[in-house]
Amino acid sequence: MAEKKKFKFNYVLDPALCMACAACELECREGGIYIDENVNYNINLDNCNRCGRCFRACPTGAISRVNNPA
């Protein structure tokens, strides 16, 4: 089985800043944005290819880029 790709960074979504406009979901081509059990938008990092479309589309800055430990 192929080893899962390791990324240098992830994107995280802060539900407190999110206004549920769906801009991120509309931009994502990988199915990386979903609505979680708390009815908040969230990022599925298993589907995310770290393209940054959601990050750039978010009008409130709710999505941020965080570096992964080496």
Image (cartoon, grey):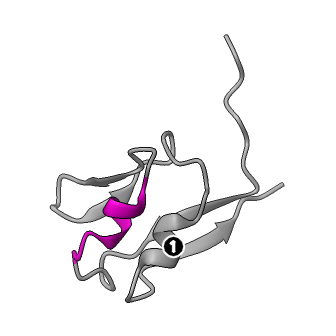
Q: Is residue 5 left or right of residue 43?
A: right
Question: Which residue does the image show at 28% across and 64% down from the upper left?
Answer: 41
Judge by depth and name the residue closer to the eye, 42 or 30: 30
Position in image of residue 56 (x %, y %) = 52, 77
Residue wearing tag 1: 55
How many numbered circles are shown? 1
In the image, farthest residue toward the right: 70
Q: Secondary structure at mark 1?
A: helix
Question: Which residue does the image show at 71% across and 23% down from the upper left?
Answer: 3
Q: Is residue 18 above or below residue 30?
A: below
Position in image of residue 53 (x %, y %) = 52, 66
Q: Does the magenta run of residues contain 33?
A: no
Position in image of residue 62 (x %, y %) = 41, 81
Q: Does the magenta run of residues contain 26?
A: yes
Question: Which residue does the image show at 26% across and 69% down from the upper left?
Answer: 22
Q: Which picture quadrant has residue 8?
A: bottom right
- Highlighted range, magenta: 20-28
In the image, farthest residue toward the bottom: 60
The quadrant of the rendering that contains the N terminus is top right
Position in image of residue 31 (x %, y %) = 38, 45
How packed mark 1 is, by other alpha carbons closer than 10 Å (few <14, some 14-19, many 20 or more), is many
Q: Is residue 30 left or right of residue 67?
A: left
Instruction: Check disc 1 and give the amino acid type.
Output: Phe
Q: Which picture quadrant has residue 11?
A: bottom right
Question: Which residue does the image show at 33% across and 60% down from the upper left?
Answer: 25
Q: Which picture quadrant has residue 61?
A: bottom left
